[in-house]
Amino acid sequence: MIHTPETDKAFKKQIKESLEKDFMRKTLTNFSVAYRQSRANAFSGMDLEGMRGDIACMKDAGIPNLPELFDEFKKNAEAAGTIIHVARDGEEANRIIAQIAKENGVKSIVKSKSMTAEETFLNDHLEKDGYEVVETDLGEWIIQMRHEGPSHMVMPAIHLSRYQVGELFSDVTAKKQDPEDIEGLVKVARKELRPKFIGADMGVSGGNFAIADSGAIGLVTNEGNARLTTTLPKVHVALMGFDKLVPDVSAAMKILKILPRNATGQALTSYVTWIKGTNECAPGPEGRKVQHIIFLDNGRLELAKDPIFAEVLRCIRCGACANVCPIYRMVGGHTFGHVYIGAIGLILTTFFHGKDKARGIVKCCLNCQSCKGVCPSKIDLPYLIKNVYAQVQEEDGGKPLKTRLTSLLLKNRRLFHTTMKAAAKMQGPATDGPYVRHLPNFLMGDHNFRRLPAIADRSLRDDWKQVKPKVKNPKLKVALFGGCATDFIYPEQGKAFAKLCETFNIAVDYPMDQSCCGLPTMMMAQMDTAKDIAGQNVKAFSAGNYDYIVTLCASCGSHIKENFPKLLTKNGAVPKNVQAFSDKLIDFSSFMNDVVKVKGEDFMNLGRKVTYHYPCHLVRGLEVTEAPMALLEKAGVDYKESNECQVCCGFSGSFSVDFPMISKNMLAHKLDNAEATGATTLVTDCPGCVLQLRGGAEQRGMNLTVKHMAEVLLEEKK
Ligand code: SF4
Ligand code: SF4
């Protein structure tokens, strides 16, 4: 039974409960760390980017033609003796399967793992009709006996310990089982399941591929249970989504090459089963097996026509978007999903199970881009999640007051900047040096895990005339895109950039009409406001003929590069000025290292002990990894790499306010890892990460100074 909270309050309560499950958190964290390494090993020496591009292209070519692919599949499968059905929704799919069971005098059913059957809640339906249904995948069997849904799409029982499984198996066998003896536990399952396979009248499976030009289906499994399920009983029923249709076996092979590697870091799965038509089978009617394939629509054919969401049908259900998600590993799949888990689950839940099931989870995304970075089909999951969130709000009849006010403020640059300046003047008694003195009492509990910065007395724009580099015959002319944090909270970072540029003879402009990049509004799913603000910024920089537009904020940079073109697309094309703006955008570290080409002799080599945190939007958004390392090496620091230095720090703007309990845990993990390096300076390339990490280190009283790379380079500059 799946219990997905339908209100914010219930969802947050469930998050808190999940965070208390220490064993689950530890297991998922260990898995996430090990997964990254095994995935890297599994793809070693392969052109992973090329393979991902191939799958995305192949899927995109098929999505608009699913009805045609289906017709071709049906013709070929029927010629081989298979009976084909179409189910408009889960209810209809379940009814068809129950009817097949009735017509064939079925009493007992074995099932191999199928997310599509989870989607339709098939087991519940068949059991209500009086059939005995037994899951035969080990993980699925375990959760079936516990009356739970899967907590991962590939490893459904990953949330359970061997002790919980040992206890369960002791109950099943009425005999004490040793939880330390994993092999023994597997033997118990084998012994219990064998007679079920042999006695079953019907086997129900899913399917990874439906191959149009042959009418064959393919199943990928690790335990061999799908083979027994599909071959031993006299009736085989496969339930598949329309999205599993591929044109031919070479398309299936492309997916097969990437699927196990991406799912679990395995080079191969143990079993790949291809089935075409019906074969001889002694107990079947006329000595032949009965085979039915049911294609489930459940909104897929409409999705295929959607200009924004069609790409979700590229999904090959590898589960990797959960493996790398920092939220999934904290709270597990029973909280971070409904039936489908992880990033793809946040999207599919709305379309397959309705907005009531999606309302809580869909706003719980850091936009950290980890899922997008590993998706073998190159689905822009974070962007689609925000679009789903926007839809849910729309259907709920409007945006919350907080969202509307923030939108109004950020859309009006003058009002926003005047408000910031007024707040800077009025905050006096509430500040304690560079920090806010303390939070109001009602926020003290959950939110008190970091110190918050005060607004700077004078913003970067206030001082720009004095700060602007004074250079003659500059070798480059650039503009600085400040973003809210550099402008109003940490102007010293912008000043450090200006000073560095002056020493390297680079002219810098700070166009005064620039504003917030709009990412916070996108995080709140205010797509129209995000679009409006993007347009204002493009206009603000259009007058200057800049060689580059540099930003010190990786989040602004990634949003401008990735999302501005999407948001401002007109009639299917990106306007030239938008593309030019996005093309000229460069992050600080890449600019200094790759464009300015700073050298080791430019720096004093003070040899301080430094560790580095990769901002999500630098490493995954902008795909920059080498420039910061090169700069630190040139600056001569004593670099100490911290564990999981590319994992999110848990800030993500309004996320850390809405979900402080998750943000707090992620920050703690990050700071523990930084502390373990023995470094005294933590460097990063995003003011948002500085805010989170510096505030956390200060709250903990750590001997760790958190700085932006621009500040460190200036301090190290000769
Ligand atoms: S963007 Fe990050 S937090 Fe959001 S679903 Fe993807 S991995 Fe999870
Ligand atoms: S969205 Fe991508 S990463 Fe997630 S399950 Fe689907 S294919 Fe795998």
Image (spheres, grey):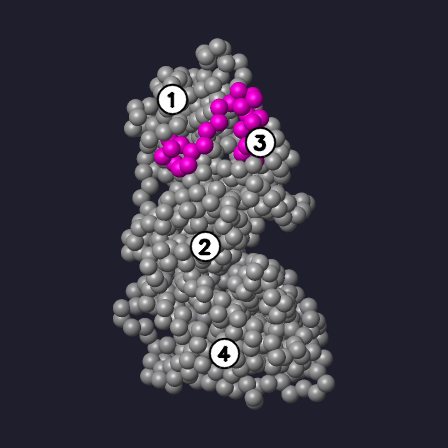
Is 435 on the left or on the right of 711, as rendered? Answer: left
Label 4: which secondary element: helix
Give the Cα separation between the discs numbered 4 and 1.
67 Å
Q: Position of residue 53 (x, y in %)?
A: 63, 48
Three-letter code, disc 4: Asp
Give the Cα separation between the discs numbered 2 and 1.
39 Å
Three-letter code, disc 3: Glu
Q: Position of residue 144 (x, y in %)?
A: 36, 32
- Can residue 304 be seen in the rendering of this structure? yes
Of tags 2 and 1, the one toward the viewer is 1
Three-letter code, disc 1: Ala
Q: Quadrant of residue 137?
A: top left
Label 1: which secondary element: helix
Q: Which residue is mark 2?
A: 385
Q: Earlier in the sequence, mark 2 or mark 1?
A: 1
Q: Quadrant of residue 95?
A: top left
Q: Residue at x 33, y 74 (%)?
A: 438
Q: Which residue is mark 3?
A: 72
Three-letter code, disc 2: Ile
Q: Residue at x 37, y 77 (%)?
A: 436
Is the Cβ of the residue at disc 4 closer than 8 Å to that at disc 1?
A: no
- The residue lying toward the viewer, choosing from 238 and 17, is 238
Q: Earlier in the sequence, mark 2 or mark 3?
A: 3
Q: Residue at x 42, y 33 (%)?
A: 87
- The residue lying toward the viewer, choosing from 43 and 541, is 541
Of tags 4 and 2, the one toward the viewer is 2
Q: Which residue is mark 1?
A: 101
Q: Earlier in the sequence, mark 1 or mark 3?
A: 3
Q: Earlier in the sequence, mark 4 or mark 2?
A: 2
On residue 487, which mark appears?
4
